[in-house]
């Protein structure tokens, strides 16, 4: 199965082509570049590198968040448009599931962390199996005041913590625990997880596919306060 996938929920923009659960080609742009302005060019380059055209693909994978609100919207808009234009199936994949898949071996449990700002973190608990990520605890917003509880669970051997190195250092400072650093969510892993879902017959409805924000945006908070 040939999959075109994108990760747009972080400061890095990533596009990948996967085939039969192997990464054929992957491009990750450095932070600081605008996703909206660069996603079309990144798709064109990855198609050229992989030797494929858009009509070759059996399905699409795209991250739904959590992460950058604007980045998630860019990826979803472009890939939902492609899904409808090409008449192919699409799967939305959580950034947290991608990080968990990258961090641990099959059979292990991971709690990925993403900086949500304001002293908060996006997290969840996931078990990596051979063909699927099992959700142990659903994606959630965790306040820094609850970090000691997370640390105690890691010490008890319930799970491992993964995420950007500087985030792990800040949380695990003063402990003897070491987390699993994952600097950049892989668009290739997004493609692999999307393919797994399609093989199980679990595509998403292109019209019903929505972002996984977890927390309201600043604009929504301002409107609510008004």
Image (cartoon, rainbow, N blue to C red):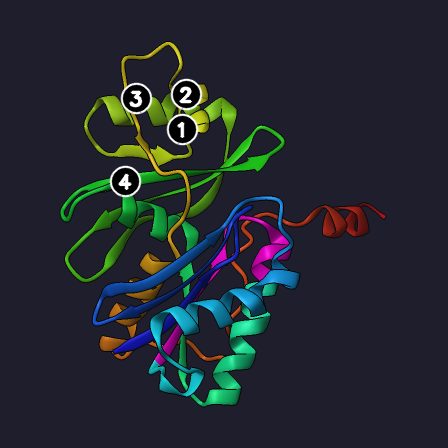
Q: Which residue is drawn at 40% across and 28% down?
A: 165
**Residue 149 x, y percent position in the rendering:** 37, 24
Of pointers 1 and 3, the one earlier in the residue sequence: 3
Coordinates of residue 89 in the picture (x, y in percent): 39, 82
**Residue named by callout 4:** 110
- Residue at the spot x=45%, y=25% of the render? 166
The tag on residue 174 is none
> Around disc 4, counting alpha carbons within 10 Å, would you say few (fewer than 14), some (14 to 19), or many (20 or more)?
many
Please name the residue shown 47% across and 88% down the image.
86
2 and 3 marks in contact (CB < 8 Å) = no
**Residue position marked by numbered label 2 in the rendering:** 169
Q: What element carries label 3?
A: helix
Instruction: State yes or no: discs 1 and 2 in contact (Cβ < 8 Å).
Output: yes
Q: Which residue is drawn at 55% across and 46% down?
A: 11
Crowding around mark 1 (Cα neighbors within 10 Å: few <14, some 14 to 19, many 20+) is few
Look at the picture and state if 44 lies above or below 127: below
What residue sits right under mark 1 in the picture?
165
What's the CA distance linking mark 4 and mark 1? 15 Å
């Amino acid at each position: 199965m040939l999959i075109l996938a994108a990760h747009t929920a972080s400061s890095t923009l990533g596009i990948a082509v996967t085939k039969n659960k192997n990464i054929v080609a992957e491009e990750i742009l450095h932070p600081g570049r605008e996703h909206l302005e660069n996603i079309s060019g990144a798709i064109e380059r990855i198609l050229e590198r992989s030797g494929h055209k858009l009509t070759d693909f059996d399905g699409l994978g795209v991250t739904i968040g959590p992460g950058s609100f604007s980045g998630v919207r860019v990826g979803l808009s472009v890939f939902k448009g492609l899904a409808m234009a090409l008449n192919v199936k699409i799967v939305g994949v959580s950034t947290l599931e991608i990080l968990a898949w990258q961090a641990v071996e099959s059979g292990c449990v991971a709690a990925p962390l993403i900086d949500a700002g304001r002293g908060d973190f996006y997290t969840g608990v996931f078990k990596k199996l051979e063909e699927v990520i099992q959700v142990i605890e659903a994606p959630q917003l965790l306040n820094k005041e609850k970090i000691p509880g997370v640390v105690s669970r890691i010490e008890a051997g319930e799970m491992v913590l993964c995420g950007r190195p500087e985030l792990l250092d800040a949380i695990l400072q003063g402990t003897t625990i070491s987390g699993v650093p994952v600097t950049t969510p892989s668009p290739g892993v997004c493609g692999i997880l999307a393919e797994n879902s399609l093989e199980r017959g679990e595509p998403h409805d292109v019209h019903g596919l929505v972002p996984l924000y977890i927390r309201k945006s600043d604009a929504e908070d301002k409107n609510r306060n008004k």
